[in-house]
């Protein structure tokens, strides 16, 4: 199984990436060496190419979770559904506190 892991690379503000293949059958591990870039002509740059690697959904999710743990967030978008739900619950709690303190009768969702 291919695993790609991300980790904070202190003290530099960098994120390290390891690629590891675990062979359960032989109880062995293989670690990828640094990637070597190969120059291609400009016509090939825009034609369909084989990806550098393919990840299972499980491995891709783990990589995304590791990058999140490294402090990386999407540069666009409104955040995750979990964040939104937590914010909505917090706002509902705050409304209840304010309504109770000021004895406001009304919609208290």
Image (spheres, rainbow, N blue to C red):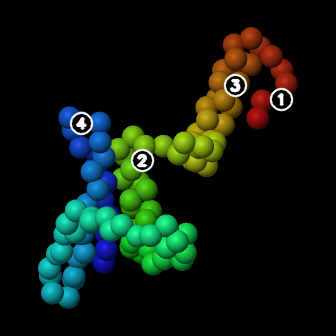
Between discs 4 and 1, the one toward the N terminus = 4
For marks 3 and 4, the one nearer the N-term is 4
Q: Which residue is mark 4?
A: 12
Q: Nearer the viewer, mark 3 or mark 2?
A: 2
Q: Is residue 84 above or below residue 34?
A: above
Quadrant into which the N terminus falls = bottom left
The local secondary structure at tag 3 comes to: helix
Residue drawn at 36 percent across, 53 percent down = 66
Determine whether, in the image, residue 87 is placed left or right of residue 26. right
> Which is closer to the viewer, label 2 or label 1?
2
Residue 68's label in the rendered image is 2
Q: Select label 4 or label 1 by which is in front.
A: 4
**What residue appears at the point 25 percent right and 75 percent down from the top-left corner?**
21
Residue 32: % across, % down: 22, 69
x and y percentages locating residue 79 in the rendered image: 59, 43
Q: Nearer the viewer, mark 2 or mark 4?
A: 4
Q: Nearer the viewer, residue 57 or 106?
A: 57
Q: Residues within 10 Å of mark 3 (few under 14, many from 20)?
A: some
According to the picture, the residue beneath numbered tag 1 turns out to be: 107
Q: Quadrant of residue 22?
A: bottom left
Q: Could you say whether the residue bearing mark 2 is in a helix, strand or loop?
A: helix
Question: Is the residue under label 4 in contact with that under label 2 (CB below 8 Å)?
Answer: no
Q: Earlier in the sequence, mark 2 or mark 1?
A: 2
Give the CA separation, mark 3 to mark 2.
32 Å
Which sits in the foreground, 1 or 19?
A: 19
* Left/right of residue 3 with respect to residue 56 in the rendered view: left
Please give the residue where the numbered disc 3 appears in the rendered image.
96
Instruction: Determine the secondary structure under disc 1.
Output: loop
Give percent across and percent down for residue 59: 39, 68
């Amino acid at each position: 199984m291919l695993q790609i892991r991300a980790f904070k690379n202190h003290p530099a503000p960098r994120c390290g990436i390891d690629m590891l293949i675990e062979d359960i059958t032989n109880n062995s591990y293989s670690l990828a060496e640094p990637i070597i870039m190969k120059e291609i002509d400009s016509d090939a740059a825009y034609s369909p190419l084989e990806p550098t690697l393919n990840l299972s959904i499980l491995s891709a999710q783990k990589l995304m979770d590791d990058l999140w743990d490294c402090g990386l967030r999407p540069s666009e978008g409104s955040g995750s559904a979990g964040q939104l739900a937590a914010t909505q619950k917090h706002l509902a709690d705050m409304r209840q506190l304010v309504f109770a303190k000021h004895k406001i009768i009304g919609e208290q969702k």
